[in-house]
Amino acid sequence: MGKGTIVLAYSGGLDTSICIPLLKERYGYDRVITVAVNVGQRDDEMKMVTDKGHKLADKHYTIDAREKFVNEYIWPAIRANGSYEGYPMGTSLARPLIAEEVVKIAAIEGARAIGHGCTGKGNDQLRFDFVFRTAGFEIVAPIRELNLTRDWEIEYAKEHNIPVPVAKDKPWSVDENLWSRSIEGGKLEDPAFHPPEEIYAWTVSPVAAPDTPEIISIEFLKGIPVKLNGIDMCGFDLIVKLNEIAGKHGIGRNNMIEDRILGLKAREIYEHPAATVLLTAHRDIEQLTLTRQELAFKHLVDDKWSELAYMGLVHEPLYYDLNAFINASQEKVSGSVDVMLFKGSCRVMGRSSQEGIYSDDLVSFDSTTIDQCHAIGFSEYFGLQARLVEQRKRKK
């Protein structure tokens, strides 16, 4: 007698595709139900995943979570200036959402176990496991548990007539959502290897980018982008359009060494044109609208928020606490930022806000609203303790 039904988080890639027969052959499950979640992948990609799921699995679901991804994951990430070790997070933001949608289907189908195709060396296994265990499901991870290699998987897929989306000479593993595209695997694992242009899909090389800069305007309302070049746009459309605009200028590439949760260092390559521009603009409008004390404290909060989001710990109580502060801080973060895009660079040219803590009358050298002589008394006390210490050193 078999083990009944298992639900599999499905991406359509090599790992999750070979999990379907493995779950039956090696684990004894009678039915494998696949769940693919649309978080902004290309339309043709989602069609391929859906068709493949219906073909290989006993039952397949494709869930459209694009709007939820924008409202509940990307917007909070912008408000928190979400980045990890210098790059805008994308894959890590989507994993908890995908996991939650898989949990819903597992409950509907009456399954007691959920499977995924993560390896035992990456971050995604932990992000998925955390959500699945929190929901009370057993976890089956064939790639991790059977210690499978990429070459073995390719051969196994061919034996089972599973279309192989990668070749041994170009075994790139690509993860894509609305906010980010990551590319890894094969020769890219070597930190010294120069990545070929063929791995990039969203960005042109800065060398091949237009020789004429482009200036765009982004308007924020309470920390959320609502207009692009003066046009009201829904979140999904704004990000799609900005990926296109910034991508053609070669903006949003990261080629880096990243510290994974397990402690392993890994070479990672990312594309995130819209994310790069929006986070740059958001940080700038915060500088205009938040006080020095708010900015200093929020920097600490943003760093901790990003660490928890990177780990996928979205049910950690501290994560909710940090979001409460961040959301409160964003009540004043409204205004417009002009950004110049040019050959891989993204530079703020100007900004304006009715909430800005700025007065040209007070700061101007030509203004007499503030009597400059008032600063003399302040200057007498400024650095007093340090001066006393230095004076004693000189006496000695």
Image (tube, rainbow, N blue to C red):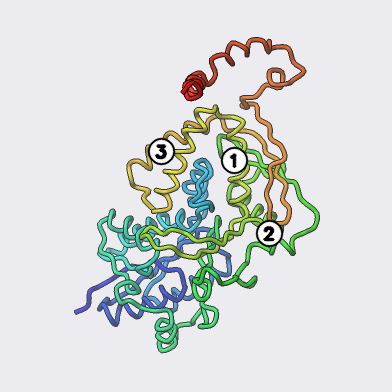
Q: Which quadrant, please, contains the N terminus?
A: bottom left
CA distance for labels 1 and 3: 18 Å
Q: Which residue lies under the disc numbered 1?
A: 282
Other-residue count near label 1 (Cα within 10 Å), few / some / many at <14 / 14–19 / ≥20: many
Q: Do the residues labelled 1 and 3 touch (CB within 8 Å)?
A: no
- What x and y, as percent, mark residue 208? 74, 64
| Secondary structure state at the residue bearing disc 3 | helix
Residue 322 - label: 3
Q: Which residue lies under the disc numbered 2?
A: 250
40 sits to left or right of 135:
right
Q: Which amino acid, mark 1?
A: His
Please give the name of the residue rendered at 55% of the width and 58% of the height, measured from the top-left corner: 180
Q: How many labels does the image show?
A: 3
Q: Are marks 2 and 3 in contact (CB under 8 Å)?
A: no
| Pointer 2 or 3: first along the chain | 2
- What x and y, as percent, mark residue 148? 36, 78
Q: Which amino acid, mark 3?
A: Leu
219 sits to left or right of 87:
right
| Secondary structure state at the residue bearing disc 2 | loop
Residue 130 - label: none
33 sits to left or right of 361:
left
Other-residue count near label 2 (Cα within 10 Å), few / some / many at <14 / 14–19 / ≥20: many
The image quadrant of residue 96 is bottom left
Please give the name of the residue rendered at 37% of the width and 40% of the height, measured from the top-left corner: 320
Relative height, residue 73 to residue 262 (above, below): above
